[in-house]
Image: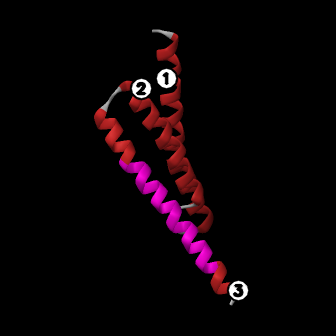
Amino acid sequence: MSSTNTIWMIIGMTGQAIFSARFVLQWIYSEYRRESAIPMSFWYASIVGGATLFAYAIYRRDPVFLVGQAFGLFVYLRNIELRFRESRQAMESRSR
């Protein structure tokens, strides 16, 4: 295995580890709140892990993997945008 392949395998594994860790973050946050909830860290881990896996899919030239990660990145970014909008609206409501 070449050093380039080894580096990309490490990148892919790192992305998968970050992507999988988001479920642990969500579980811990839900236990803390005593209700099912999704923290912002879930979405940030989704973006970082998904982007890393997307880069790995480009390197591997895997169209199925590329499409799946591209769609996921869109969803994660949209959820972050919605959460920021909710925060802004809440701050505006409090300042009135």
Q: Which residue is mark 3?
A: 95
Q: Quick one: which residue is furthest to the top in this view? A: 1
Q: Which residues are magenta?
A: 71-90
Task: Give the distance between the C-alpha atoms of the residues marked 3 and 2, in whole angstroms.
Answer: 49 Å
Q: Is residue 82 magenta?
A: yes
Amino acid identity at mark 2 = Tyr
Task: First in sequence, mark 2 or 1: give its number.
Answer: 1
Q: Residue at x 54, y 43 (%)?
A: 48
Q: Considering only vertical position in the picture, is 46 above or below 60? A: below
**Magenta includes 87?**
yes
The secondary structure that most of the magenta stretch takes on is helix
What mark, if any, has residue 59 been given in the picture?
2
Residue 37 vs 25, above or below: the answer is below
Instruction: Indicate the secondary structure of the residue bearing disc 1.
Output: helix
- Residue at the location (56% across, 51% down)? 44
Q: Amino acid at mark 1?
A: Trp
Residue identified by numbered label 1? 8
What's under tag 3, amino acid-wise?
A: Ser
Answer whether labels 2 and 1 touch (C-beta < 8 Å).
yes
Q: Secondary structure at mark 2?
A: helix
Q: Nearer the viewer, mark 2 or mark 1?
A: 2
Q: Is residue 37 toward the left or the right of residue 56 in the image?
A: right
Residue at 45% across, 9% down: 1
How packed mark 1 is, by other alpha carbons closer than 10 Å (few <14, some 14-19, many 20 or more), is some
Give coordinates of residue 32: x percent, y percent: 62, 63
- Mark 3 or mark 1: which comes first in sequence? 1
First of labels 3, 2 by sequence position: 2
